Amino acid sequence: MSELPKRYDRNIRLFGEEGQRKLRKTNVTIIGVGGLGSPLVQHLALLGIGSMTPVDDEELDETNRNRFVGAKHDDPVPGSPKVTIAARLVREIDPRVAVTPVQASLVSEEAFAAVKQADWVFGCFDEDGPRSILNELCAAYAKPYVDLASDVPEPGVYGGRICVAWDGGGCLHCLDALEARDVQDYLSTESEKAGRAAIYGIPQDALREAGPSVSPINGVVAALAAGEFMCAVTGMRPPQRLINYYGHVPKLTTGKPKPDCYYCHSIRGKPDDADVERFLRMPHLRQRKH
């Protein structure tokens, strides 16, 4: 294994020394390090990436303890930023991985800077609004973006999906992975939402509380994302554009992007044309938790 630590021996048996070196040179940013992002942090640290920037504005609460990988029973609530726990997890796994926690929301200068300096970006959100923003930001700056989602839409039905937008040949929009109404609602001001509600009424699903979320489902989705990232970086194969996970069946399916996507073709690698920094100029977005 030459100069590579023996801890990577079983990695190297799969994708070779050069693959491990490529991972060690890779810098990732993870936006959202909760129940879905924390197992992803664990997988990436175990793979032996070079550096990681976890970004999240929230602190641990009691309801997170059933699924937050790395949280200890005596971590104080309140008082334990999620990014601090994630950074501790990385250092406990492999102190050679440089980790820079950023306690900030997606729509902030700090988060945007973390995306711009990354080699790969991961998004772990509960809502499609921030997914849409991060999808556009990564397209504008030509950053490979892996989006993760877990879902329990009704009793007995559960799963999730990952989308890998890595070369301009498919993204959340052209893979139909976003609900347009949810994106519109997220980007709207409170007065705009109130106006629509007065005309059309308030959709029932807009009133629902947070749904179920358990470690095994999140773990499967995080492992699928880490696996596609591993394949892409080491050169084992190109990553799948879209993987849908139906855990209650169980089965996996894949999808193909639609042609002529604005985000994949018109603004990819053109930050000036995209002006994605316009989101930073929207006070109502900067005040939201993501």
Image: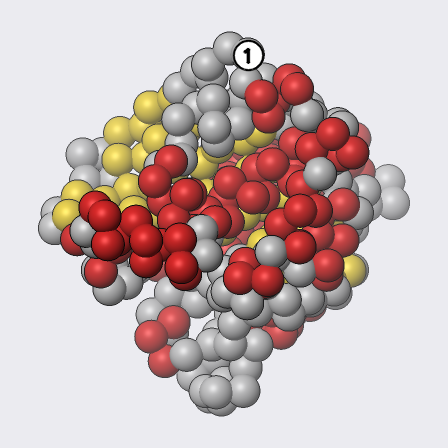
Q: Quadrant of residue 134?
A: top right
Q: Visible in this render: residue 40? A: yes
In the current view of this chain or complex, which residue is farthest to the left?
155
| Left or right: 99 as drawn, with respect to 78 | right
Image location of residue 143, percent across then percent down: 70, 35
Q: Residue furthest top?
A: 259
Q: Position of residue 59 (x, y in %)?
A: 51, 76
Q: Is 199 displayed left or right of 241 in the figure?
A: left
Q: Whole-percent x and y of residue 171?
A: 53, 27
> What residue is at 40 percent from the left and 59 percent from the top?
191
Locate the N terminus by quadrant. Answer: top right
**Considering only vertical position in the picture, is 59 above or below 153?**
below
Q: Which residue is mark 1?
A: 260
Give the percent coordinates (x, y) of residue 237: 60, 20
Comparing 92 with 225, the one in front is 225
Q: Is residue 46 left or right of residue 65?
A: right
Secondary structure under tag 1 reads: loop
Q: Residue at x 52, y 72 (%)?
A: 58
Work out whether residue 12 can be spotted. Answer: no
Is 137 above or below relative to 108? above
Three-letter amino acid code at the position of disc 1: Asp
Q: Residue at x 18, y 34 (%)?
A: 249
Q: Nearer the viewer, residue 271 or 70?
A: 271
Q: Residues within 10 Å of mark 1 (few under 14, many from 20)?
A: few
Q: Residue at 78% across / 34% down in the picture?
A: 272
